[in-house]
């Protein structure tokens, strides 16, 4: 039976690189943030996102239809769904209980510093950390504890970490997951030109330039707000030993 591998991440993480990695598997199709249009069309968040109008105009906006489309694709191959935590507007998205969920973390200081390069005044709801913690609690309460991974752990030794992730997913590891062609994927969302410069210039996993970027002083309160949510999940992170 084919799987829906549901990656829940914050922005400016290695989520796109992971999507590229799984796209190299012959047994897997990938989807780039299929709930983005739904989120923008229904959120009360008023932060303007790059390509906002185009995303709403071109993407499916009905959550049920999106889920049905994902499940239909899984009848053909495994499906890797790259998604942002804040795109889940409901507190109890029960449809993810049927999927294999991976939660991808990044230290909030690195995440916020990188995110601020595109949107200069992000709020807690924009970076996903609080929502990730809530979704972890929801999954755990329903007996579906997700795999929790961390971008820093991944970068220590991508091959070893991907092997561990595949083992947890009950999938065979493929060497093809370690490299991809530069320049992007056909599955990239229409927002790729705004967000994916680093991964488009790469052909494998590498440390991001933003990892050493200083956090703007005006975002220190956001970091303080995000850290308790991140710390609540640290003990669950899959280690790359």
Image (cartoon, helix red, strand yellow):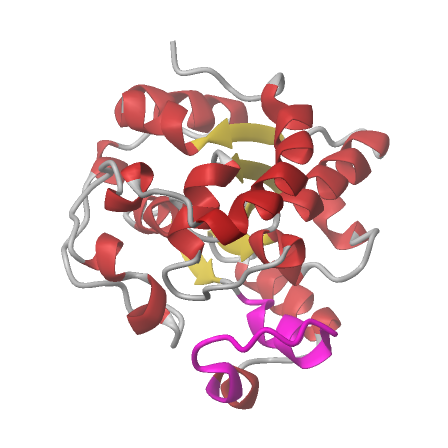
**Residue 178 sits inside the magenta stretch:** no
Tell me which segment is drawn in magenta.
Answer: 34-54
Q: Position of residue 65 (x, y in %)?
A: 69, 74
Residue ID at (62%, 58%) = 123
Residue ID at (68%, 34%) = 229
Tell which of 184 and 64 is nearer to you: 184
Residue ID at (30%, 45%) = 210
Tell which of 150 and 185 is nearer to you: 150
Give the quadrant of residue 187.
Answer: bottom left
Tell which of 173 and 122 is nearer to you: 122
Quarter of the image with the C terminus in it: top left
Q: Position of residue 72 (x, y in %)?
A: 60, 64
Tell which of 155 and 66 is nearer to you: 155
Give the quadrant of residue 89.
Answer: bottom right
**Residue 35 sits inside the magenta stretch:** yes
The answer to whether residue 15 is above or below residue 123 is: above
Residue ID at (57%, 52%) = 127
């Amino acid at each position: 039976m084919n799987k829906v591998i549901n990656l829940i991440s914050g922005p400016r993480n290695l989520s796109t690189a992971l999507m590229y990695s799984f796209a190299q598997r012959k047994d897997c199709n990938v989807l780039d943030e299929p709930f983005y249009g739904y989120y923008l069309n229904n959120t009360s968040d008023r932060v303007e996102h790059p390509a906002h109008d185009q995303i709403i105009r071109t993407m499916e906006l009905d959550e049920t239809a999106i889920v049905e489309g994902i499940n239909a694709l899984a009848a053909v191959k495994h499906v890797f769904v790259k998604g942002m935590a804040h795109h889940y507007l409901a507190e109890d998205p029960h449809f993810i209980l049927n999927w294999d969920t991976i939660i991808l973390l990044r230290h909030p200081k690195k995440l916020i510093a990188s995110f601020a390069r595109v949107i200069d005044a992000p709020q807690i709801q924009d970076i996903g950390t609080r929502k990730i913690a809530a979704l972890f609690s929801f999954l755990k309460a329903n007996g579906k504890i997700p795999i929790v991974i961390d971008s820093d752990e991944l970068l220590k030794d991508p091959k070893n970490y991907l092997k561990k992730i595949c083992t947890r997913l009950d999938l065979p590891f493929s060497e093809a997951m370690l490299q991809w062609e530069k320049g992007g994927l056909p599955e990239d969302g229409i927002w790729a030109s705004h967000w994916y410069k680093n991964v488009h210039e790469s052909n494998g996993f590498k440390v991001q330039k933003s990892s050493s970027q200083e956090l703007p002083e005006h975002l220190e309160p956001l970091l303080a707000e995000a850290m308790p949510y991140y710390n609540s999940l640290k003990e669950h992170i899959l280690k790359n030993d």
